[in-house]
Amino acid sequence: MIESERQARVKKSTSLHLAMEAAETLRQITEFPDNPESMAYFYDLYQSRFKDGMILPQNGKKLVGTMCLQVPDELIVAAGAVPVRLCSGAYAFDQAGGDFMPAKSCPLVRATMGMLQVNNDTMKDNLSTVVIPTTCDQKRSSAQMLRDMDYPVTVLEMPATKESDEARTYWQESVKQFALTIQKICGRKITAKSLNAAVRSKLEAGKLFRSLQQLRTESNPVILGKDIWLVSNSYFFDDPDQWCQAVRGLIAELESRKSENFSAINRKAPRLLFTGSPPIFPNLKLPILVEQAGGLVVADETCSSQRLLHDAVVFDEKNLYDMVPAIADRYLKPCTCPCLTPNTDRAKKILDLVKSSRVEGVVYQAFSGCMPYEMEQRAIGDMLSREGIPMLFVETDYSPEDQGQLSTRVEAFIESIKVRRRKTQ
Amino acid sequence: MSSIRRFLNNSDINRFRFYFQLFAFVLLVYGGYLAINIGEQLPTFACVFGEKRGGSCYLLGFQHQMTFPYARLFSGPGIGVLIGLATFAGFFIIFNKAWCGFACPLGTIQDWLTILRRKMGIYYSNYSEPVFKGLSTIKYILLALLILIPMAIGNSFFGLPTLNHDFGVPFCMICPGRTLLPLFNGDISQLTIDFSSKTKMVFSGLGMGVTGMFLAGAFAKKRFFCLFCPMSALHYIFSRASLLRLTKDGEKCTRCGNCYRVCDVGIRAIADDLDHKNIVKDDCMMCLKCVSACPEDDCLKATYLGIPLYESTAEGFFRRRLKKDD
Amino acid sequence: MKGVYSRGFFATCLSLVLLLGLCPDLSMAKTDAIWIAPAKAERKPSGQPGQPHHPEGHGESSAQQSGRPAQTSQAGRPGRPEQAKQSGRPGRPSGSGGEHAGHGGSSGRFESEHRPLPVRTYQIVPEQLLPEARAMILQADGTARDLDVETCHTNVFSVKLPMEEGPMHGPNNIYVFDQQIKDGVLEVRTAKWLTIHHSCGWGHDYRNDPERLKARSLESAPLDIVVDNLWDGNFHNALHSGDELVIRVFSYGKPVAGVTLTIITEKGWTKRKKTDADGIARVQLIRDYYPSTWQLFKRTELGKLAMTAEFTKEGASNYKGEVVDKTHYISSFSWKYVPAGDDYNSYSYGLLIGSLGFLGSGFGIFQYRLKRRKPKKTVVFDE
Ligand code: SF4
Ligand code: SF4
Ligand code: SF4
Ligand code: SF4
Ligand code: SF4
């Protein structure tokens, strides 16, 4: 009795904090001048979802929670369920997770676990299963914790490398197995037709996202990076059709901005690339700081945005025997997650983005406790310095406390880029 | 110019290829009815045994010429051999290995078998990497044999007795082109076992066995035969000089593997090789399916004399992938 | 190499030749036909110069062949694709015929259109021609011209064939005519020979050209034997044992009915037939090659075939001032044939091995796939 009362109290206060946090982030975001009008859809969306302890999609279909973008959500959609990515960026949940998670664990995992713990009563029944791929140690370990909390957990076995034929086959078989599992859980058979529809839906989203990405890198800045994160983050939980509709509207607006030569920010703003541990709403602290300091994030290499929708499924034959492995390939082969080794593709990807988006500096975020990104920081930094691109490495977490100190560093970094620019010109 | 390029890049090469293959098949297998003769040294299996062909496979003549004794080979008639080889190379250099992807009647038959299998919903086979590498060397062995065996007819090797003339065109005897392509001219006479000599009997028996394996193999594995094809080995000698090229910009490649996934031959390098610009591998048939499946702008490209003909673009990619399903 | 059968046969022929001192075929000897045969002069330098020359032409050549390995030279050549490919584009390569084999002759080498010669020399057998004899050639393009009569008197005459594409590229008919009064009957004799003049180097413009390829009849020939379908669209012999011969007989360009045709093969098979109202006779060729085992079988085994046509016309005619009341026309023609493809090609074995290959690999693939399912290595959807 006491325990459940305490639980209810925690839930209530966390819910309150969550709403406040979301409102604060949205306030900072909307404070920028010249926000695109079409962004209103997304601002409202976050406002309506980040309350009452997080509102999951409700449309009568089964919900399948995922804990990483490595989960092939096409299969979930084809099985008639709705995938929702549970990875959380909320400090409120991070604090709740701190009650039972190690102090040095990754805030992303801690917040996600915190959310599931706080909402234990409702989410357990809403989620048909939580899919956890065996990526980084912390996600792997949280699978067991979730089981102990009585969540239905599906582990998706993923190899720690993607180079060898064996690893690729192993992953394909693992995804094929997952297809069988998920259709059992959802009670609906995956067919070539339903899978094709799911693939197309995600391709459509990918296509729109690429256009958005393209507009973002225009030399005349028509949209800021912080908005891009809002857009891509919302794909975690929004209805794909509505999402596409909203993005189409946004693209149209940006196109007209482009033709009117309208800039959303100073055209001279240093062009930056953001990479590292994924910023997830409401924790858009660092991107917002960067742009508040006068930088412009024209590209990112994070699994909460660019990596989420960039890659595309291609199959040769419209039969499950080819489609499912093709989906598996899409989630492994282009993957640049540092939990893979070797992971040379990430450096390559960053370099390509730097060149194609004419980037002048890189902001590298690592969550304290996120070992893979922290450890890869060196290699990326070395690679960039060889290319003559400065990099700002920031180790941070979800708490707002270091904001002041961070903003000084960020401002200094941006200033240094401006100085470099003057020198070279 | 840019609008033409955009149109090309947005186009669906697979559909074009399907119809072009059909056209080439009719031309090469039935061209004789219209007195069409493209050439005698074609770098493709326009089988000479097909009476109504519209051009001729080079391998038969090539094998025959190899039966010349050295004295002939290195004198006057040797010039004829060189001219033949040069003509072959000339044909090849114009289209590179696209002869395989777009023209070869035997390749087309394999593609039709693939369509049949797909329609039947039977899954295809794949080779693991070591198996692929192993099998892929067989074609060089076959190429060596189809030169050496005929040579042993006109010349004695190491004092061994020369072979009899029934060994004249050893590869043709086991080539599925010989047994299958004349069928399209209504000529079933190649389906026989020739008992007129032991050599003929063995060779024609092998030929029929290979034909059976060809049909079963090509049904289960896309472009099954092409991995063993000595024509393809002969192609590769000249491939670098070709005007048509398939190039890759490793910097743009995300190693997403889409290109490998659609590659009927199963060339891993197309996705994993980031270092070579010229990406035409010996087994490639230049079908350009990989270009159409690559979602990165300018990553894969087919160029002719340096002018891009077909490039991978995100726009084209999504257009093809999202077009109305048939 | 040489089959038991042919050895025995040639031995018999040789003894017959020796015995009769004439020609091996009695029925042929009975008729008074004259024949054209490639002359000794045409023999390749490598031939045995000392070989006695038998003026019998076709009938006799067998005796010669027993003496020298003519067959070896043929055996290596026809019926194989590479042979055809030799000088350019081949025709139907393994069309199981004696491609480009040419006629058999006493030279021991066949008169082959794929080894064109600038001059071909022929002789008349069995006897000296009469003084009034003339020779004509009906060229491949359908034009006819006289051949030098003078040379006819020596029993040997030559035909020049330009080594290039031209009116003689293709089948050329060579005729020799003579006549005399014998026992109160006017005897009009015709001999016909066909040489195909072709080199792949001259191109294949006439490939499958019916006009250039058709069997022709000479308007001025007193009696002319025309056999259809002896060669295919690319100048290869197309006659196989078992085929039906369609023989048309013309006299001065008009078909004649009631002509007695005698067909005789080298191996002694004889068939007599009379032409019908359209001047046509159809004769099915015998299959006469039966080696004891298949190892002895040669698909290029050449059989020779001779035919005569004769008929007597009642009615007075005047020759050199002498009047007779009967005219006897006689004409000769010869060709060759090879075993039919069915004799040595087996569809059933072919399809058997083909299906075994297909089913074997199919089954192998199937087994492999089954094996991969258990213990689970791959998931297979049942859809
Ligand atoms: S960092 Fe890697 S493991 Fe973590 S959520 Fe992103 S993709 Fe998944
Ligand atoms: S049998 Fe094969 S190699 Fe020979 S000509 Fe025909 S297609 Fe070419
Ligand atoms: S490799 Fe294939 S397509 Fe090319 S020539 Fe050989 S059989 Fe034909
Ligand atoms: S499809 Fe394009 S991006 Fe993907 S691996 Fe192939 S070449 Fe690289
Ligand atoms: S590499 Fe590309 S062009 Fe070559 S065969 Fe494969 S898909 Fe076709």
Image (cartoon, coloured by chain):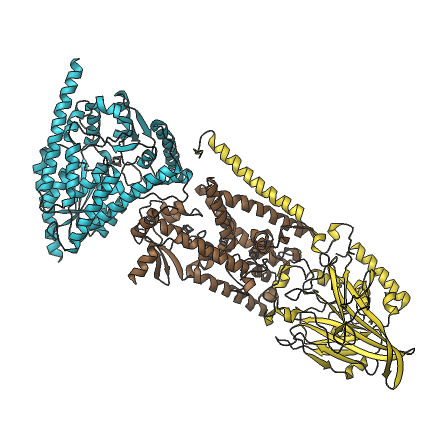
Query: Is A57 or A22 nearer to us in this picture?
Result: A57
Query: Is A171 or A246 nearer to us in this picture?
Result: A246
Q: The brown chain is which one?
A: B
The image shows residue B325 at horizontal and vertical percentages of 37, 46
Q: Is residue C234 left or right of residue A204?
A: right
Query: Is B312 or C228 nearer to us in this picture?
Result: C228
Indicate the quadrant where residue B255 lies: top left
Q: In this view, does A312 lie to the left or right of A424?
A: right
Indicate the quadrant where residue A37 lies: top left
The image shows residue C337 at horizontal and vertical percentages of 74, 61
Q: Which chain is yellow?
A: C
Total marks shown come to: 0
The image shows residue B233 at horizontal and vertical percentages of 49, 54
Q: Can residue B120 be seen in this view?
A: yes
Give the farthest residue toward the top: A1
Q: Is residue B27 left or right of residue A420?
A: right
Which quadrant holds the C terminus of chain A? bottom left
**Vertical position of residue A140 compared to residue C56: above or below:** above
Indicate the quadrant where residue C168 lies: bottom right
Give the farthest residue toward the bottom: C321
Give the farthest residue toward the front: C277
**Vertical position of residue A140 compared to residue A348: above or below:** above
**Vertical position of residue C275 compared to residue C139: above or below:** above
Write down the colour of chain A: cyan
Ligand 1: give its quadrant: top left
x 26%, y 45%: residue: A347
Q: Is residue A282 visible?
A: no
Which quadrant holds the N terminus of chain A? top left
The image shows residue B6 at horizontal and vertical percentages of 31, 57
